[in-house]
Image (cartoon, rainbow, N blue to C red):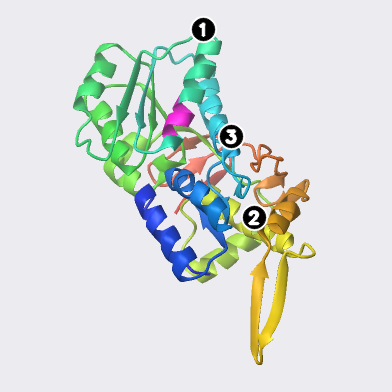
């Protein structure tokens, strides 16, 4: 495999795409950056390149060109699950601070707010931040002064400062988040503020095959995975792609010159092969790709984040995040 790191920056996704496709001849590309996926999808359709996103799936990505597939948990489901937790704990009033530098956190936030409003609840404070935000004291002070009971922190490592600032100001609000709050960077900034944070995450069902895969992963990489969703979905996505490539006509090999073999990938056949896979039993769960190219069959669940890097799913089950 050829690998480029776009650092979750859409402009770098475009640069990596141009390098891989136009200089290296890549025809199938895995993409894990939401904004980058949207940026390259139209040109990938023109170039006859097949895209697979194994981190994002939502109703927006379902509208991308037909050569774009998303094999992942559904973004909106994370927002709905967070709203369900807030409602179940009656943590009102609520507030949300989310990253507006890419579409992902905005989609998640809107789904959460819509679910709350459907049940007669509105967020007291909705605040955005971006990569240039250097402090969160202003919004944290407003949250504290309005006696907010639930704060959804939906973003990346930088948002760990918001969690720490809230606790430094004496706010006892229950914090909510998603798997990005388990990253080493977020935890290093937030410190003990992560302890007891509630979240909505993807969780692979425990199984013998999952244990085997984890053992192989650690043996190859030298550490546990840091983000379960992107790791497990990517593994399943590659397994599904392998099946799709075995579709008759998906790959043709010519011998135009002596001792030279050239393979051609038929993108339409790859798409046909993926859509033909129904109820695939993967590590992510039972996977079916809908006709619009995304999965809606992978569930999310509630979790409690710990400052030591573990995630509690119930009273007896914990998993190290890395």
Q: Is residue 21 above or below residue 127?
A: below
Is residue 296 found left or right of 277 in the rendered image? Answer: left
Q: Give the mark toward the camera: 2 or 3.
A: 2
Q: Tell me where residue 59 sits by quadrant.
A: top right
Secondary structure beneath disc 3?
strand
Q: Is residue 102 left or right of residue 38?
A: left
Q: Earlier in the sequence, mark 3 or mark 1?
A: 1
Q: CA distance from mark 2 to mark 3?
A: 19 Å
* Residues shaded magenta: 105-109
- View extreme (top): residue: 120
Badge nearest the viewer, 3 or 1: 1
Residue drawn at x 52%, y 65% as measured from the top left = 218
Main SS of residues in magenta:
helix
Residue 298 percent across, percent down from the top left:
65, 40
Q: Which mark is residue 236?
A: 2
Residue hosting label 3: 301
Residue furthest bottom in the image:
258
Instruction: Using the numbered discs, state the Cα–Cα distance from disc 2 to disc 1 in whole angstroms.
Output: 39 Å
């Amino acid at each position: 495999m050829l690998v480029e790191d776009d650092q979750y920056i859409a402009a770098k996704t475009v640069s990596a795409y141009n390098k891989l496709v136009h200089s290296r001849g890549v025809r199938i590309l895995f993409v894990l950056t939401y904004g980058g996926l949207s940026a390259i999808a139209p040109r990938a359709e023109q170039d006859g390149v097949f895209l697979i996103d194994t981190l994002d799936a939502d109703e927006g990505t379902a509208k991308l060109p037909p050569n774009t597939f998303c094999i992942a948990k559904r973004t909106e489901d994370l927002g709905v699950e967070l709203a369900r937790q807030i409602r179940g704990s009656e943590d009102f009033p609520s507030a949300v601070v989310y990253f507006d530098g890419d579409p992902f956190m905005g989609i998640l936030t809107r789904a959460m707010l819509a679910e709350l409003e459907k049940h007669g609840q509105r967020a007291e404070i909705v605040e955005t931040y971006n990569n240039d935000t250097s402090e969160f004291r202003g919004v944290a002070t407003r949250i504290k002064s309005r006696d907010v009971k639930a704060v959804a922190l939906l973003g990346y490592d930088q948002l760990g400062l918001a969690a720490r600032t809230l606790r430094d100001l004496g706010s006892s609000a229950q914090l909510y988040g998603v798997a990005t709050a388990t990253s080493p960077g977020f935890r290093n900034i937030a410190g003990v503020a992560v302890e007891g944070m509630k979240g909505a995450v993807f969780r692979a069902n425990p199984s013998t095959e999952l244990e085997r895969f984890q053992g192989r992963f650690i043996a190859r990489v030298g550490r546990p995975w840091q983000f379960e969703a992107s790791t497990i979905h990517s593994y399943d996505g590659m397994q599904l792609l392998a099946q799709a490539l075995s579709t008759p006509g998906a790959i043709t090999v010519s011998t135009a010159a002596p001792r030279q073999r050239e393979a051609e990938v038929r993108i339409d056949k790859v798409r046909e092969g993926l859509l033909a896979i129904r109820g695939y039993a993967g590590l992510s769960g039972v996977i079916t790709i809908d006709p619009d190219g995304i999965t809606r069959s992978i569930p999310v669940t509630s979790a409690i984040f710990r400052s030591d890097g573990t995630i509690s799913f119930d009273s007896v089950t914990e998993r190290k995040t890395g």
